[in-house]
Amino acid sequence: MNIKESLNKYEFLQTASDLTKEIGVEAYIVGGFVRHLLLNKEVEDIDFLVVGEVLKFTQSFANSLGVTDIVIYKNFGTAHFNYQGLNFEFVGARKESYKKSSRKPEVSEGSFYDDISRRDFTINTIAVSIGKENFGEVTDEFGGEEDIKRKLIKTPLDPKLTFDDDPLRILRAFRFASQLNFEVDKSILIAANELKNRLEIVSQERKTDEFLKILKSPKPSIGLKLLQESYVMEVIFPEVSQMIGVEQREEYHHKDVFFHTCEVVDNISKKTENIWLRLAALMHDIAKPKTKKFIEGSGWTFHGHEELGARMMKPIFKRMKLPMNKLEYIEKLVRLHLRPIALVSDEVSDSAIRRLIVAAGEDLDDLISLCRADITTKNPDKVERYLQNYEIVVKKVMEVNEKDKLRSFQSPVSGEVIMKVCNLKPSKKVGEIKIAIEEAILDGVIGNNYEEAYQYLLKIKNNFNSE
Ligand code: CTP
């Protein structure tokens, strides 16, 4: 990869280069932009590192490009603006040290080397000059290019120092490994374990953001396993960390729930970019450790783990500051994940199928995808058989759905009509009658339409005393 050549297609860099001379600063591109160029990935942000008057440089650069909307943080010596769909970030070279109790840095002006050595990973320390005399020259103080080739996440300094400066970097290490399919240096795992409790000082939003980036990556199990291996999971997601381990009693052992879950998450990630469906996959067996019981003569059971799992979601969402408007979706998928497979047998009634359709509502397709991803047996015959089973369920669902148009199920007779016919005021009883009609539809006693529901109401109304 010839970095200099690839820079030529960004004309605005020539403008920036001319300005470095005019204003008398050194300027470099660092971080994600260079990493993305070297990995042939699309660039989104550009981080400029400026030695000298960074804000003056930013202002003149923006003026030359005709950009008026600039955000400046004077105290931090940073600024940013958007241009041609890219986010331009500017930072003055600095020496940073972080207070032990906070992640807010104490910043003072520093040299190019001071700045670059206090960055997170070697792959982010490669700097490309945009100076007039040495445009495109690469400075790679810590062997970042080599680490990209070796697919390795490593810190430029002792990882304990790098992580102590900013503990969020522990999660960033695993996130980059997961996104890029890289390994992390052993020293990172050791330091991460040692300093994991320092993550306390990092805001929940930033931690959750990194965690979700792991889930968004092509193979999330890479990051999840690193979190587990370094025991960082105990700190950031104790419920997931408790899924690890297998117990043996007599001749019975159970699958390791954590590694099974990793496979399910990877499976679903091949099928969908929907981060919330991926999260549901991570959560589906979350209550197995809490519900595990050994039954003499028959082995391990996890009765009720789907219901308890669903109930565990709200406190987890609150603690991790996950978006509450996704809670119901995740609860539903966790609660229902065992239901489809129970519907395979020939004797299954239309009523059971209808109940699943109504319970899953518009998320039925996602539920079936989750169930398919849940098949992690290594026996290809079994995989084939289990997948066919879901085909059977899907076929039944489609047949019943076609017949009943149930997906957007709403009682065909409204509360108003019930009150009028039964001479009732708004009360609990109205709800009970409504439920009785819905049950009759789900049981197939009547069809899902107004006429049959109304006739049924007339038939049952005397069973409910009027007020
Ligand atoms: N950086 C750091 N420590 C952090 C965050 C950022 O050292 N906790 C440095 C890294 O050198 C990084 C640069 O600041 O490359 C820009 O940060 P950011 O935009 O967060 O990272 P990118 O590398 O651009 O990657 P991504 O956009 O995927 O986060």
Image (tube, helix red, strand yellow):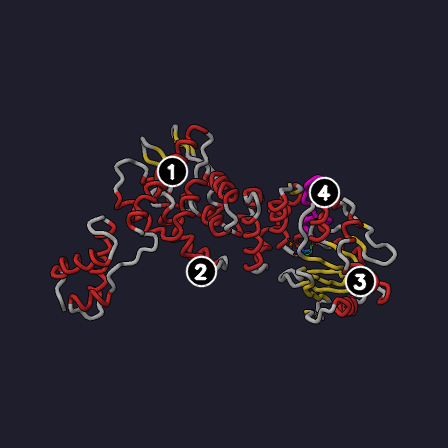
Mark 1 or mark 2, which is nearer to you? 1
User: Badge 4: how crowded within 10 Å, few (<14), some, or many (20+)?
Assistant: some
**In the rendered structure, which amino acid carries the disc numbered 1?**
Glu
Q: Which residues are magenta?
A: 146-162
In the image, residue 338 sits, relative to residue 447, either above or below, namely above
Task: Kindly report which numbered mark, 3 or 4, lies closer to the viewer in this rendering.
Answer: 3
At x 29%, y 47%, the residue is 403
Q: Distance from label 1 to label 2 (Cα)?
A: 31 Å
Q: Residues within 10 Å of mark 3 (few under 14, many from 20)?
A: some
Between marks 3 and 4, how big is the CA–CA gap? 31 Å
**Labels 4 and 1: the sequence-earlier one:** 4
Q: Is mark 2 within 8 Å of ligand 1?
A: no
User: Is 36 within the magenta?
Assistant: no
- Along the line of sight, the residue nearer the viewer: 51 or 137: 137
In the drawing, what numbered circle is on residue 456?
none
Q: Which residue is mark 4?
A: 147
* Label 1 with label 2: CB-CB less than 8 Å: no
* Sequence-first tag of 3 and 4: 3
Mark 2 touches mark 3? (CB < 8 Å): no
Q: Is residue 169 visible?
A: yes
Q: Which residue is mark 1?
A: 391
How crowded is the residue under tag 2: few (<14 C-alpha within 10 Å), some, or many (20+)?
A: few
* Numbered label attached to residue 325: 2
Residue type at tag 2: Asn
Q: Name the N-terminal-most of marks 1 and 2.
A: 2
Tell me the quadrant of ligand 1: bottom right
Give the amino acid type for the residue marked by disc 3 in the picture: Thr
Is 229 drawn above or below residue 210 in the view shown?
above
Q: Secondary structure at mark 3?
A: helix
Circle number at residue 15: 3
What residue occupies the far right of the structure in this picture? 133
Q: Earlier in the sequence, mark 2 or mark 3?
A: 3
